Image (spheres, helix red, strand yellow):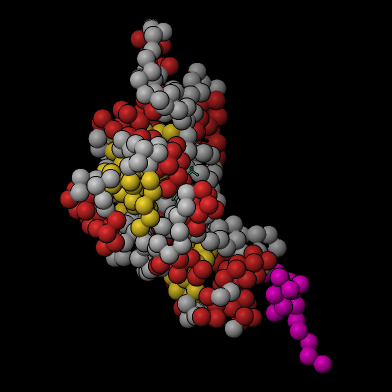
């Protein structure tokens, strides 16, 4: 009688999992200095619109090499503010990558704009500068590039196209804080650069976001936009000793608190070390994954420092391609928090049913999507965690091949 040891039986089929607890795909690193930074502000005078907002903005603009930084309460609020500052109005077209988080394209819709989806390069999943010429019309006002997985886009090519057609270039840099393109920091590569501080991102404030820009006028517009469209904030009025304020734009309450900003300052100090650590883990993955010819990591261009927010792989063999969803479930059952980033945005029901986008507009993105899987990566991930990921992959790939 053949004995199947439970070690080889997939956990999804009742076998023993490689890990008892789920290894998440990303998570925050919080230490005592972060906690102290937050609690110190909690016992201070200003919980919001206080001095820590400005301090965080100053540190952030120093770090990214950008003239201005404007802090808001989420990455999505940052995108919305950037699109507002770019002057996008009803009917204006904005080019966005097909593969990104939905918020990139949604921010265009918030102001009545029309997202025009651009296809991606299949080896990096970054917006393909070569397709942009076909998409630009007299209605095009801006391009949003997204630094997928932490690798900066080709901002040289994107800048040239934007300047030729008088378009505003926006970087959705929610994945790439701490990265570089040709030795220039992310945050200084586009006209407006957008960041998120959600816990899975490079640094966290719980929820939070930032926009950097060298343009003082755009920065001023976004400061007004985050505060109901009012041209002065509470603290400025208190300092000036006046009650009077003027609402000059239709803005929102996108203000971030001072204790969140204190956390952001504390986190930013540790970011360079975390980026090194993410690069180390990514290199380990690249080496270990050579064992599996059925999968391939994305191509990392030599003129970039990748911030490795995600470690994405592409399923190469035909056998695996048709089984992505099974692989996902099977690896999850083994305790490995794999994920999929992202479905082409226009395939979501809202875009298909409400906005009538059709299938087939970005063939590369649609081809790649069923082959995509992201593996856990974050700074405090340990050597044993990496070994668990590879062991689980070996187990699952052997079972399906
Ligand atoms: C996280 C993320 C956002 C949105 O950020 P939130 O802080 O969650 O609102 C936008 N775009 C991309 C590419 C992201 O990864």
Magenta stretch mostly in which secondary structure?
A: loop
Position of residue 372 in the picture relative to residue 181 (left or right): right
Span of residues in magenta: 1-19
Q: Is residue 362 visible?
A: yes
127 and 17: which one is in front?
Answer: 127
Looking at the image, residue 61 lies above or below residue 351? above
Looking at the image, residue 236 lies above or below residue 336? above
Residue 149 falls in which quadrant of the image? bottom left
Tell me the quadrant of the picture where the C terminus can be found.
bottom right
Residue 213 falls in which quadrant of the image? top left
Give how far across and how far down residue 331 sits, in percent: 62, 68
Residue name at image x 45 percent, y 74 percent: 296
Position of residue 3 in the picture relative to residue 256 (left or right): right
Residue name at image x 45 percent, y 28 percent: 252
Residue 18 is inside the magenta segment: yes
Q: Residue furthest bottom?
A: 1
Looking at the image, residue 123 lies above or below residue 85? below
Position of residue 27 in the picture relative to residue 66 (left or right): right
Residue name at image x 78 percent, y 90 percent: 2
The total of numbered circles placed on residues is: 0
Give how far across and how far down residue 293 sits, in percent: 48, 81
């Amino acid at each position: 009688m053949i004995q199947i040891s439970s070690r080889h039986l997939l956990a999804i089929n009742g076998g023993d999992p490689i890990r008892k607890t789920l290894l998440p795909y990303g998570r925050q690193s919080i230490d005592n200095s972060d906690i102290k930074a937050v609690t110190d502000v909690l016992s201070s005078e200003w919980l919001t619109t206080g001095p820590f907002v400005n301090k965080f903005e100053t540190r952030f603009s120093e770090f990214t090499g950008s003239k201005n930084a404007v802090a808001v309460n989420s990455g999505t609020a940052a995108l919305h503010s950037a699109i507002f500052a770019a002057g996008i109005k009803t009917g204006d077209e904005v080019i966005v990558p097909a593969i990104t988080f939905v918020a990139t394209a949604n921010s265009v819709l918030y102001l009545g704009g029309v997202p025009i989806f651009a296809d991606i390069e299949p080896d990096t999943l970054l917006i393909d500068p070569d397709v942009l010429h076909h998409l630009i019309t007299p209605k095009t006002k801006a391009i949003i590039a997204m630094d997928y997985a932490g690798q900066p886009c080709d901002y040289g090519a994107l800048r040239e196209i934007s300047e030729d057609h008088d378009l505003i270039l926006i970087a959705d840099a929610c994945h790439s804080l701490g990265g570089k393109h040709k030795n220039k920091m992310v945050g200084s590569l586009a006209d407006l650069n957008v960041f998120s501080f959600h816990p899975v991102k490079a640094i966290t404030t719980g929820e939070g976001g930032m926009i950097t820009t060298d343009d003082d006028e755009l920065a001023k517009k976004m400061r007004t936009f985050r505060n109901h469209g009012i041209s002065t904030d509470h603290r400025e009025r208190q300092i000036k000793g006046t009650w009077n304020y003027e609402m000059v734009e239709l803005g929102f309450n996108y203000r971030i608190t001072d204790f969140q900003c204190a956390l952001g300052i504390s986190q930013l100090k540790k970011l360079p070390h975390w980026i090194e650590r993410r690069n180390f883990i990514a290199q380990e993955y690249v080496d270990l994954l050579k064992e599996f010819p059925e999968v391939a990591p994305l191509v990392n261009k030599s003129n970039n420092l990748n911030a490795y927010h995600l470690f994405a792989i592409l399923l190469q063999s035909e056998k695996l391609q048709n089984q992505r969803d099974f692989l996902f479930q099977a690896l999850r059952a083994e305790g490995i928090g794999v994920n999929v980033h992202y479905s082409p945005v226009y395939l979501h029901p809202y875009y298909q049913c409400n906005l009538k986008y059709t299938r087939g507009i970005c063939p590369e993105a649609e081809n790649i999507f069923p082959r995509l899987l992201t593996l856990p990566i974050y700074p405090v991930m340990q050597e044993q965690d990496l070994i668990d990921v590879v062991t689980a992959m070996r187990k699952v790939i052997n079972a399906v091949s």
